[in-house]
Amino acid sequence: MPERGDKMTDGTPGTASSAQDRYHHGDLATALVTAGLALVRAGGPEALSLREATRVAGVSPSAAYRHFTDRAALVSAVADRALSQAGLAMQARMDDDGADADPARRARGHLRAVGLGYIDFALAEPGLFQLAFQTPAPSGAHDYAAPSDQVRHPLVLLISALDELVEVGVLPAAHRSNAEWACWSAVHGLSDLATRGPLHAQDRATVAKLAEYVVDAAIAGVVGADPAATSTTGRRPGAGAKGPTG
Amino acid sequence: MPERGDKMTDGTPGTASSAQDRYHHGDLATALVTAGLALVRAGGPEALSLREATRVAGVSPSAAYRHFTDRAALVSAVADRALSQAGLAMQARMDDDGADADPARRARGHLRAVGLGYIDFALAEPGLFQLAFQTPAPSGAHDYAAPSDQVRHPLVLLISALDELVEVGVLPAAHRSNAEWACWSAVHGLSDLATRGPLHAQDRATVAKLAEYVVDAAIAGVVGADPAATSTTGRRPGAGAKGPTG
DNA sequence: TCCGGCATGTGTACGGTGTGAACATCAGCA
DNA sequence: TGCTGATGTTCACACCGTACACATGCCGGA
């Protein structure tokens, strides 16, 4: 019989013997997710193997199937946690950056913080980022509801930042529709190029500068782009990116 | 002994017996790449298994190691082919769309075609797209040189489209630097969101409309965005960071 | 012409993975 | 107290990448 004592189920040393050294783990589901999160953080989504997760949890491989129908189910559960962490990081950044007294500047700062927070999270936690945003979605289960309690989905943060920009008058209401996809595409694309693509080997400072440029260009694009005149036949003058806030 | 006749090495029926039914395959390397390409097209990068590729080629698994050091090497070779196909598709679209007599309109059409061609390729061949652009790069081997003969790398197409926009006067030279990353980020992000992300289940027409919007917003962003005046705090002019690849 | 070397393909084996079926353990309830 | 269902274990299977020893046969030198 293998030794089952050398595992650290959680960070709660008070209940040291509650879930260990017993035939029944006690809270294997969350233990597996926690272990999976660590694996993904260390080695990316590919490193999340069901067997390794059970090994970390000090349990036999088949035990996982009492709590997850599939490896995919475990991956999905870990992805949810990763999504929450992304939302938390972005929210924190918004709270820091968007403290301007002027409403227009504050709104623009919020949108900027959302974009830069997204990219920062991708750079700081590439494994979690990939898992959170590059997974075919569990099965259409949750539609951008809170991935967990109290944590707002990153897309919700983006949407509310854009709505705020409309309320404040910076973004014309006529330009509002689809703006979230243009913004999300820009920051997501840069994040992917920087975490796995051709910008992978680039030094951090360069990527950070690029991130600012990309976010600013995206904002300028949605604020200034006239969706009714975007064909090759040319845009009307005066539709420049210069926002009303100057 | 397994039957080795049921394979189609290439599209050259003239030499039907040249590479088949013989102990030595004759051109196993390209046969494996061709098989791998089919596997990726059908099931995405994950479906490219070395064993399955050798099975399709009618050869034992170990035979692959005479031509590729690794599974990664085979993947990389297939990725090169995928990259070429992407370049071809984008080039074809550019030739179709960018036929305006007016130089400024033609230049803008070229950039639009590059972006829409990129997204179209991703939607038409999601497996090849993922393999081509979401692979950690072979090992810094080829720096955007022609992935094959005669085919220009997608990034090269983008860069020349932007350069053309500068020559024609639509894009101020001061806004040129880093523009390729803003554009690439936007189209790559949308492609990723649409092939694996939350837009995966969206119907094709909706995504196509979104693609046009995103491309136009990206163009508006780089053409109109003043990289020195978009930040909330207001950065000094002339602080445009030079592109990482030069 | 024969022959030998070397590139190429085969067979077998090992450790890794996900997953299912049968069995073991234990908590909680009648 | 003993049963029952939830949970964990053991064993087994098929698949994967990969390494090693061996088989085959093309091609150039004698």
Image: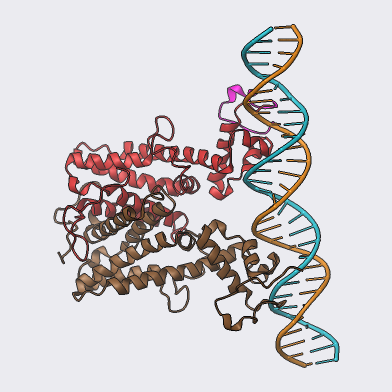
Chain colours: A brown, B red, C orange, D cyan
- Residue A142: percent from left, percent from top: 49, 70
How many tags in the picture?
0
Q: In the depicted view, which residue is nearer to us: A140 or B187? A: B187
- Residue A111: percent from left, percent from top: 29, 67
B178 vs B18: above or below? below
Q: Which residue is at 49% across, 46% downward?
A: B131
Q: Which residues are magenta?
A: B2-23
Q: In the depicted view, which residue is nearer to us: A15 or B56? A: A15
A26 vs A189: above or below? below
Q: Which residue is at 32% across, 71% downward?
A: A94
In this picture, residue B104 sits left or right of residue B37: left
In the picture, the quarter occupied by the C terminus of chain A is bottom left
- Residue C18: percent from left, percent from top: 65, 59
Q: Is residue B6 magenta?
A: yes
Q: Is residue B206 magenta?
A: no
Q: In the depicted view, which residue is nearer to us: B166 or A82? A: A82
